[in-house]
Image: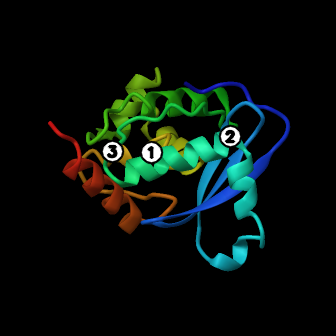
Amino acid sequence: MIQANGENKIWGYMTSPIGLLKITASDAAVTAVERIISEEEKPAGMEDKMIEHPLIRQCCEELQEYFAGCRQSFDVPLAPSGTPFQQRVWNALCQIPYGKTRTYGEVAKMAGNSKASRAVGMANHRNPILILIPCHRVIGSDGSLTGYAAGLETKKYLLQLEKENGHG
C-alpha cells in the first residue's frame, strides 16, 4: 500500500466535514493529507490543480466517499516520507479495520516492537497522510481517546462516522 516517494509535488484542496484538507501528491502517489486551519493558508487558484492531477482527484473522490459513509478503504497509492520504523507503524495502521480501534501497544506489536508504544505515538504524530493512514483509530490502553494532529474533536468525529457506517 505504501510506496516509494516521487520527486515532483503538486497539491490541491478540498472542503470536508472536518475542514479544509490540503492533498499533496508526487507523480506516483499521495504524499500528504493535512487539515488546514484557515482559508488564508490556501493560495488562490489552487482548486484548478486539484482537478488537473489524477491522483489528487482520485484522493478527493475517495475522501468524499469516505465522508459520505460509502468507502471503508482507500485505493489511491500512498508514499509518506518517514523513518523505517514510522513506515512500519503506518503500514500497521492501514491494517486496522474500518470502525475498529487498536491501542498504542497493539500497534507496536503489529509494527514488530511490542515495547515501542511511545514511539508509535510519535509516529502517529508525524503521520503526514491523515485519514488514509488511519492514526485516528489508535487509542490509549485504557480506551481513552488520546492526541490527534487534527484535534480530538476531529478524532471523535472520524471514529463516530466509522462506527455509524461500519455495517457490521
Which quadrant of the view contains residue 73?
A: top left
Residue 94 x, y percent position in the rendering = 44, 32
Under circle 1, the secondary element is helix
Q: What type is the residue that disc 1 sits on? A: Cys
Tell me the CA gap for discs 1 and 3: 20 Å
Q: Which residue is mark 3?
A: 70
Comparing 22 with 126, the one in front is: 22
Q: What type is the residue that disc 2 sits on? A: Pro
Residue at point 37% right, 40% down?
104
Check contact, mark 2 vs mark 1: CB within 8 A: no
Q: Quadrant of the C terminus?
A: top left
Comparing 26 with 150, the one in front is: 26
Reply above or below: 14 against 44.
above
Tell me the CA gap for discs 2 and 3: 21 Å
Res. 135 mark: 1
Under circle 2, the secondary element is helix
Which quadrant of the view contains residue 2?
A: top right
Q: Give left or right: position of 121 versus 50.
A: left
User: Residue placed farthest to the left in the image?
Assistant: 168
Q: Residues within 10 Å of mark 1 (few under 14, many from 20)?
A: many
Residue at point 49% right, 42% down?
132
Q: Which residue is mark 2?
A: 54
